[in-house]
């Protein structure tokens, strides 16, 4: 089976700065040199995508304990590692900018979607699984767990792509836009891969 290893980061014109023992990229690539504000698209994307990524990491660790299938476990490992690294970068940028990691505004406000209807049950943004779905994944094993994980992660990636495209359009920090574009490219590729993996298991994406 063909495999896709997630895009982590690395703008060629970025400077790497160590903050709190972690390494983050700071833009020197033609983007805005001004520090983003707390209500900017840059800050909103960093906050919301960090939350979105955390759930992907959680789901990936769940399925690695629920199946022995090598392909699913490798995909889950790739997604967990990639999105954990990206999440660290996003939170690190907020630290560098001196901005809070949480906001009183609803999720997606920076995309003019703050008034969107809430799915509820722990699903804060498009594509995110509900608490009920996560509990279901924890109860399943083998092929059933693989299928549900691939379906949930496909939905998750579709929501993530939509959000990352919003940053590409709205963010002002060049290296953050590059990270967002990398997310779009990698997650679209993984959506195609997961469609094939579902077909191999006699299933298909939920939407």
Image (cartoon, grey):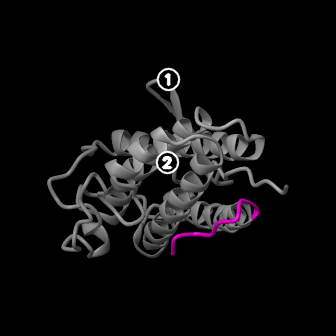
| Mark 1 residue crowding within 10 angstroms, few (<14) / some (14–19) / many (20+) | few
Q: Kindly identify the residue that appears in the image at 24 percent across and 44 percent down.
A: 100
Q: Kindly identify the residue that appears in the image at 28 percent across and 51 percent down.
A: 122
| Mark 2 residue crowding within 10 angstroms, few (<14) / some (14–19) / many (20+) | many
Residue 201: say if magenta. yes
**Taken as a whole, is the magenta stretch helix, strand or loop?**
loop
Q: Which residue is mark 1?
A: 21
Q: Nearer the viewer, mark 1 or mark 2?
A: 2
Which quarter of the rendering shows the N terminus? bottom right
Going from N to C along the chain, the mark reached first, 1 or 2, is 1
Question: Magenta stretch?
Answer: 200-207
**From the viewer's perspective, is 164 left or right of 202?**
left
Q: Which circle marks residue 186 in the picture?
A: none
**From the viewer's perspective, is 80 left or right of 111?**
right
Mark 2 element type = helix
Q: Quarter of the image holding residue 199?
A: bottom right
Q: Position of residue 71 (x, y in %)?
A: 76, 46
Q: Kindly identify the residue that appears in the image at 54 percent across and 57 percent down.
A: 153
Q: Which circle marks residue 56 in the picture?
A: 2
> Which is nearer the eye, 196 or 105?
196
Q: Residue furthest right?
A: 1
> Which is nearer the eye, 97 or 100?
100
Q: Position of residue 159 (x, y in %)?
A: 45, 67
**From the viewer's perspective, is 114 left or right of 163?**
left
From this view, report whether residue 106 is shown above or below residue 20.
below
Q: Position of residue 45 (x, y in %)?
A: 38, 59
From this view, report whether residue 101 is shown above or below residue 200.
above
Q: CA distance from mark 1 to mark 2?
A: 24 Å
């Amino acid at each position: 089976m063909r495999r896709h290893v997630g895009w982590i980061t690395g703008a060629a014109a970025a400077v790497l700065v160590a903050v709190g023992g972690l390494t983050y990229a700071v833009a020197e690539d033609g983007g805005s040199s001004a520090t983003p504000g707390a209500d900017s698209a840059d800050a909103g994307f960093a906050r919301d995508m960090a939350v979105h990524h955390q759930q992907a990491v959680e789901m990936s660790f769940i399925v690695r304990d629920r199946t022995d299938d090598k392909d699913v476990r490798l995909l889950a490992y790739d997604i967990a590692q990639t999105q954990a690294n990206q999440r660290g970068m996003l939170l690190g940028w907020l630290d560098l900018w001196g901005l809070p990691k949480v906001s009183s505004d609803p999720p997606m406000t920076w995309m003019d979607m703050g008034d969107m209807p809430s799915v509820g049950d722990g699903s804060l943004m498009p594509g995110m699984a509900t608490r009920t779905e996560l509990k279901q994944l924890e109860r399943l094993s083998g092929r059933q767990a693989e299928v549900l994980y691939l379906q949930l992660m496909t939905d998750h990636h579709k929501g993530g792509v939509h959000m990352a495209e919003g940053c590409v359009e709205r963010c002002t920090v060049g290296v953050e836009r590059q990270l967002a574009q990398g997310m779009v490219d990698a997650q679209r590729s993984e959506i195609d891969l997961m469609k094939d993996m579902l077909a191999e298991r006699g299933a298909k994406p939920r939407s």
